[in-house]
Image (cartoon, rainbow, N blue to C red):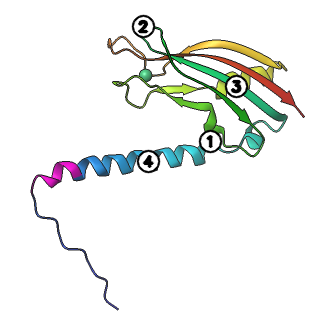
């Protein structure tokens, strides 16, 4: 049995584009892996019957609303739903992870909690990052 090996691409201007694609694929694979690593809501928080999270994301500089959404979660949902990407254009791999906030509420037997968060990559570099405000309500089983 012979395996057909695809012909080599000619070294040309295509190389740069190829590298971008490789980077894109790597990022997509990383995202899939993160989803797998996150696991299900039922695995991490078996006591939660359902949960609703309202999130508003704001621009770092102007404070204007970027995006607003409500996430409804049931035990079969992937915990990765608790991650939100930082929408600021210059932000690389930043974002928000509400898992620890949910954990805190569960630990204290609280049904609701709200607060604010700054992008995890925000630092003194001067690049502006988004922030969010969140409102979590939990129904226990
Ligand atoms: Zn950011």
In the picture shown, does residue 11 fall above or below 29?
below
Ligand 1 sits in which quadrant?
A: top left
| Sequence-first disc among 4 and 1 | 4
| Sequence-first disc among 2 and 4 | 4
Where is residue 118? Give x, y as percent.
51, 15
Q: Residue at x 33, y 15 (%)?
A: 127
| Image side of residue 27 versus residue 11, left or right | right
CA gap, disc 2 to disc 4? 30 Å
Read off the residue under disc 2.
62
> Mark 4 Cα within 10 Å, few/some/many (few <14, many 20+)?
few
The residue mark sitting in front, 2 or 3, is 2
CA gap, disc 2 to disc 3? 24 Å
SS class, disc 3: strand
CA gap, disc 2 to disc 1? 33 Å
Q: Residue furthest top?
A: 62
SS class, disc 4: helix
CA gap, disc 4 to disc 1? 15 Å
Where is residue 88? Give x, y as percent.
40, 22
- Tell me whether circle 4 and circle 1 mark residues in contact (CB < 8 Å): no
Read off the residue under disc 4.
28
Which label belongs to residue 53? 3
SS class, disc 1: helix
| Sequence-first disc among 2 and 3 | 3
Whether ligand 1 has any atom under 8 Å from the Cβ at mark 4 is answered as no
Where is residue 3? Give x, y as percent.
31, 83
Q: Magenta residues, as a range?
A: 12-17
Read off the residue under disc 1.
38
CA gap, disc 4 to disc 3? 25 Å
């Amino acid at each position: 049995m012979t395996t057909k090996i695809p012909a080599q691409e000619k070294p040309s201007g295509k190389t740069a584009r190829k590298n971008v694609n490789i980077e894109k694929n790597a990022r997509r694979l990383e995202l899939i892996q993160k989803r797998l690593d996150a696991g299900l809501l039922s695995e991490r928080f078996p006591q939660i019957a359902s949960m609703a999270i309202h999130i508003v994301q704001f621009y770092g500089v102007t404070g204007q609303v970027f995006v607003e959404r409500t996430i409804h979660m049931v035990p079969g949902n992937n915990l990765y739903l608790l991650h939100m990407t930082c929408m600021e254009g210059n932000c690389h791999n930043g974002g928000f992870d509400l898992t620890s906030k949910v954990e805190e509420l569960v630990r204290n037997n609280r049904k609701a909690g709200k607060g604010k968060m700054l992008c995890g990559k925000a630092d003194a570099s001067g690049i502006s990052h988004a922030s969010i405000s969140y409102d979590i309500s939990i129904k226990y089983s």
